[in-house]
Each structure stands twice: as C-alpha cells, then as structure tokens.
Image (cartoon, rainbow, N blue to C red):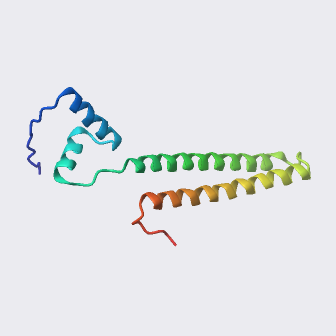
Amino acid sequence: MATARHRIKVSYTDEELAQLDAQRNQVRLSRSEFLRRISLGHHLPDANEFAGMAAIGDLLSVNADLARVGNLLKLAIDEADGQFGAPMLARIEELVLETRNTQTAILGKVEDLHFEIHPRRKRRT
C-alpha cells in the first residue's frame, strides 16, 4: 500500500545551502532525510560511527589477508614433499601460529571497537 508523501518548499541562499550540505555530508544523509530528522527531532548518526565502521572494515580486510597468507604457508608445507628442511618447516609453522595469534588479536580489537561504537549492544559470551 502506497503512503502519501507531502512536499514542503523551502528556500535557501547559496551560503545556507552550502552550510546545510556540509552538515548533512558529515552524517551521510540526503537533504530530505537530514531535514526530516532535524525538523522532527530524530537522532542524527554520529560522524564518529562512520570512522569507527571504516576502521572495522580495514581491520577485517587485514584479517582476511592474514588468513590468505596462512593458507599459502600451509599449502607450501603440503606441496613441499620433504623438500624443506626441518628448520624451514619449523619457521613456517611458527609463522602460521603468529598469523593465527595476530588474527585473534585483530578480531578482539574489532569487537572492542564495535562495542565502543554501539555501547548498548551485548557482547557474546
């Protein structure tokens, strides 16, 4: 079922429009949504949330890269067929372990950052 929408015409000077656009760009909303939220007293997104979510995305990307490196190291071991000496195999195993530990640390930081951005959400136990 379609809902009825009503349009309200509002006039701005060039300077006012530039100020409006600067404010709405900070919170990544369209003009209509920004004006609707302001006029009705609704919550505006916090610009810091966007920075935090971008940081989470970056950390998860690094985590995925580490997973690929770990998988390549394991593949190198599997395909070596004894060509690597014991010291090289030990070093590769050590790198795999370091990769896993780094991934665990990254995921912990992602979770900490997530709950800093969204403090009312509950942590999984």
Q: Reply above or below: 79 against 12.
A: below
Q: Residue at x 46, y 62 (%)?
A: 115
Residue 69 image offset from top left, x and y in percent: 69, 46
For this view, does 52 lie left or right of residue 74?
left
For this view, does 69 lie left or right of residue 32?
right
For this view, does 106 lie left or right of residue 90?
left
Residue 81 image offset from top left, x and y in percent: 85, 48
Q: Of residues 58 and 93, which is closer to you in this image?
A: 58
Residue 8 image offset from top left, x and y in percent: 9, 39
Residue 61 image offset from top left, x and y in percent: 56, 46
For this view, does 68 lie left or right of residue 114?
right
Q: Reply above or below: 114 against 24.
A: below
For this orientation, the residue located farthest to the top is 14
Q: Residue at x 65, y 48 (%)?
A: 66
Q: Residue at x 88, y 47 (%)?
A: 84
Q: Of residues 80 and 113, which is closer to you in this image?
A: 113
For this orientation, the residue located farthest to the bottom is 125
For this orientation, the residue located farthest to the front is 15
Q: Reply above or below: 11 against 118.
A: above
Q: Residue at x 89, y 45 (%)?
A: 83
